[in-house]
Amino acid sequence: MAYHVGKDLRHWAPISVNCTCLRVRKAALALTNHFESYLAPLNINSTQYSILTVLDILEGSSVCQLAEIIAMPRKTLTRHLKPLETRELISIEQGFDKREKTVTISDAGADLIKQGRPLWELAQSDMVERLGRQGWRQTHELLEVLATINDQ
């Protein structure tokens, strides 16, 4: 399919090729798809698996705290929590403050992350193999810098 472009592409090409934000977004999508292909047998996406893992480690959390830990807006997090609650992988209860809700992982949720652990490890080891051990470490170092860019 041909697209009509009203601008001279030579002007915009360097931006589309060199834009850090666009490149990180594309990489994030590719990584998400990679991990989700491994987690597919569990009928869970990578974000939901991460949420369950964090809840298991914390032994429960407020929605605000969970949103901060996984770097996700609260409304987006709430959308990800609904299917987990429907599948009874988590429970959401009223917190001490009536405006706050507390999220805890259920036994079924804990079982699911145990089932998913070998799948996640395969996805992770595949990434390490593709990048090489040093490339993998460097990638993590660069991602840490990018994640804290607004803190400076």
Image: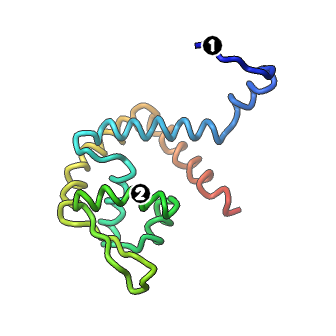
Q: Residue at x 45, y 34 (%)?
A: 132
Seen from the viewer's position, the closer of residues 75 and 151 is: 75
In 3D space, how far apart are the residues under numbered discs 2 and 1 (Cα atoms)? 36 Å
Residue 118 percent location from the top left of the image: 24, 45
In this rendering, position of residue 123 left or right of residue 30: left
- In the picture of the structure, the residue carrying the numbered disc 1 is 2
Q: Could you tell me which quadrant the C terminus lies in?
A: bottom right
Q: Secondary structure at mark 1?
A: loop
In this rendering, position of residue 101 left or right of residue 116: right
Q: Residues within 10 Å of mark 1 (few under 14, many from 20)?
A: few
Q: Residue at x 34, y 71 (%)?
A: 103
Q: Could you tell me which quadrant the N terminus lies in?
A: top right
Residue 18 percent location from the top left of the image: 70, 32
**132, above or below 137, in the image:** above
In this rendering, position of residue 138 left or right of residue 106: right
- In the picture of the structure, the residue carrying the numbered disc 2 is 79
In this rendering, position of residue 129 left or right of residue 15: left
Q: Quadrant of residue 138?
A: top right
Seen from the viewer's position, the closer of residues 131 and 22 is: 22
Q: Secondary structure at mark 2?
A: helix
**26, above or below 100, in the image:** above
Q: Amino acid at mark 1?
A: Ala
Q: Quadrant of residue 87?
A: bottom left
